Image (spheres, rainbow, N blue to C red):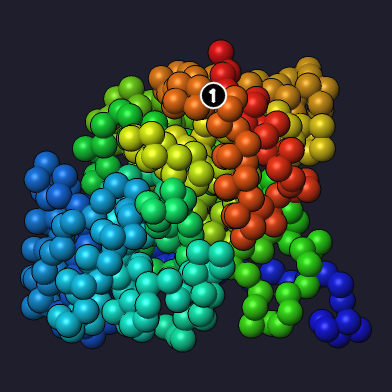
């Protein structure tokens, strides 16, 4: 029997980015770039990192020590909008950079990826995005080298071929995914995360936790429908034996270290452990995929913009996490119980009781991190639920990875459960 005869896809691929991890490893970036035979590059970052830390200045010095020219564009927006990214593309398009450095949180890394794409293969901004947002044009081939240096521990963007954009006029966030967006190298230096304030530590840490949980609970790769062609196999391919190992370890490490990093930002050991966990969670979800909480996070963030506020991505994802696990528990008893066991004590409980504990433990962690108590505290009420569910249904790239069939009714049930937790 050949591939074309099968109703399902029996294959998964696991894409990785080369990682360099360690305290002080940022100092090696000049050497790393010199091995790529590049001459002139652009650091994509944000003004807060430039003005409140020395990391951008240090990075520039380390690069220039190797006689490599580099300039800085520091207009990255939090939860970057279509307009802000277009400004970055316009700035970079005629400057003949032969490499890009993304330096900052997920917003900087995602912006750097998209600037790299549209300066490598210029096109209308909507071309490379999938319908219904864009036209679904395939990226022609490899891009310029991109070095990703995360200064937060959560998004995992340094390991993935995904970038997220806020389309303000449509009140929605939407992702662009391709193997060509995977960075050339991820530089993971825990020292650069010491400046993160507690709220950012909490939001990005919960983002990392949800990456791992969603990757772990994604539909198994072996029951995913067969793609129309080998070339069209998706970036997100379902949970698999490699992503499972990484996701389990990430959940465990985050459970052991997030509160310590939150309560004492100068705890370098906790910071290092969170930086490590966020990246392996990124490797897990960058291959297995994410599903319902991430799909719901985009309309939550988009509708919040309409109400006049910006919700950090990690918070928008985490806020429906406990409710999703509660709904999943009857169907994914073993996996939910395993999540609970990695986060807390489940000895003596039945599998189903342990499965229900997963939701409880995630909610308790959010409470300890002083996160909002459900979507009600974010300004939503029951009357908003149908609209949020309807807009989440657009995210079929993600919802196809859900382990249970997704309907508007299911999303409304999860949102109802997410109104308030404690």
Horizontal side, residue 252 vs residue 41: left or right: right
Horizontal side, residue 113 vs residue 290: left or right: left
The x, y position of residue 399, in whole percent, is 66, 52
The x, y position of residue 231, in whole percent, is 64, 82
Residue 7 appearing in the image? yes
Crowd band around label 1 with a 10 angstrom C-alpha radius: few (<14), some (14–19), many (20+): few
Residue 374 appearing in the image? no
The x, y position of residue 27, in whole percent, is 18, 60
Query: What residue sits right under mark 1 in the picture?
Result: 381
Q: Relative to 401, say whether 227 is above or below.
A: below
Q: Most extreme residue toward the right, as rendered?
A: 1
Can you say which quadrant of the picture contains the N terminus? Answer: bottom right
Considering depth in this image, is 8 or 272 the residue closer to the camera? 8
Can you say which quadrant of the picture contains the C terminus? Answer: top right
Q: Relative to 40, say whether 320 is above or below.
A: above
Q: Residue at x 41, y 36 (%)?
A: 304
Q: Secondary structure at mark 1?
A: loop
Q: Most extreme residue toward the top, as rendered?
A: 422
């Amino acid at each position: 029997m050949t591939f074309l005869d099968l109703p399902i896809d029996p294959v998964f691929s696991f894409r990785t980015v080369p990682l360099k991890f360690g305290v002080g490893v940022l100092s090696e970036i000049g050497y790393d770039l010199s091995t790529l035979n590049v001459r002139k590059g652009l650091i994509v970052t944000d003004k807060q990192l430039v003005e409140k830390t020395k990391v951008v200045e240090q990075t520039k010095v380390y690069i220039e020590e190797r006689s490599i020219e580099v300039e800085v564009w520091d207009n990255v927006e939090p939860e970057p909008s279509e307009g802000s990214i277009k400004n970055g593309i316009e700035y970079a398009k005629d400057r003949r950079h032969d490499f890009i450095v993304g330096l900052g949180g997920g917003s900087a890394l995602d912006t750097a990826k998209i600037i790299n794409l549209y300066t490598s293969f210029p096109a209308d901004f909507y071309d490379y995005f999938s319908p219904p947002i864009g036209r679904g044009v395939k990226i022609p081939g490899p891009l310029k080298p991109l070095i990703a240096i995360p200064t937060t521990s959560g998004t995992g963007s340094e390991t993935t071929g995904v970038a997220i954009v806020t389309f303000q006029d449509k009140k929605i966030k939407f992702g662009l995914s391709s193997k060509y967006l995977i960075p050339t190298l991820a530089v993971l230096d825990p020292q650069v995360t010491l400046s993160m304030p507690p709220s950012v530590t909490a939001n990005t840490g919960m983002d990392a936790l949800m990456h791992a949980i969603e990757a772990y609970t994604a539909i198994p790769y072996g029951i995913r429908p067969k793609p129309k062609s080998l070339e069209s196999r998706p970036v997100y391919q379902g949970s698999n034996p490699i992503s499972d190992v990484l996701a389990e370890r990430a959940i465990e490490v985050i459970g052991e270290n997030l509160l310590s990093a939150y309560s004492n930002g100068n705890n370098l050991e906790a910071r290092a452990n969170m930086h490590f966990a966020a990246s392996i969670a990124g490797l897990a979800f960058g291959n297995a995929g994410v599903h319902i909480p991430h799909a719901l996070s985009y309309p939550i963030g988009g509708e919040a913009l309409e109400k006049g506020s910006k919700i950090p991505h990690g918070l928008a994802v985490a806020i429906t996490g406990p409710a999703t696990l509660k709904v999943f528990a009857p169907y994914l008893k073993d996996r939910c119980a395993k999540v609970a066991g990695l986060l807390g004590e489940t000895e003596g409980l039945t599998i189903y009781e342990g499965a229900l504990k997963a939701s409880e433990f995630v909610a308790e962690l959010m409470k300890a991190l002083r996160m909002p108590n459900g979507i009600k505290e974010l300004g939503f009420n029951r009357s908003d639920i149908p609209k949020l569910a309807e807009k989440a249904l657009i995210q079929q790239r993600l919802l196809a990875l859900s382990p249970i069939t997704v309907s508007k009714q299911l999303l409304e049930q999860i949102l109802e459960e997410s109104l308030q937790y404690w």
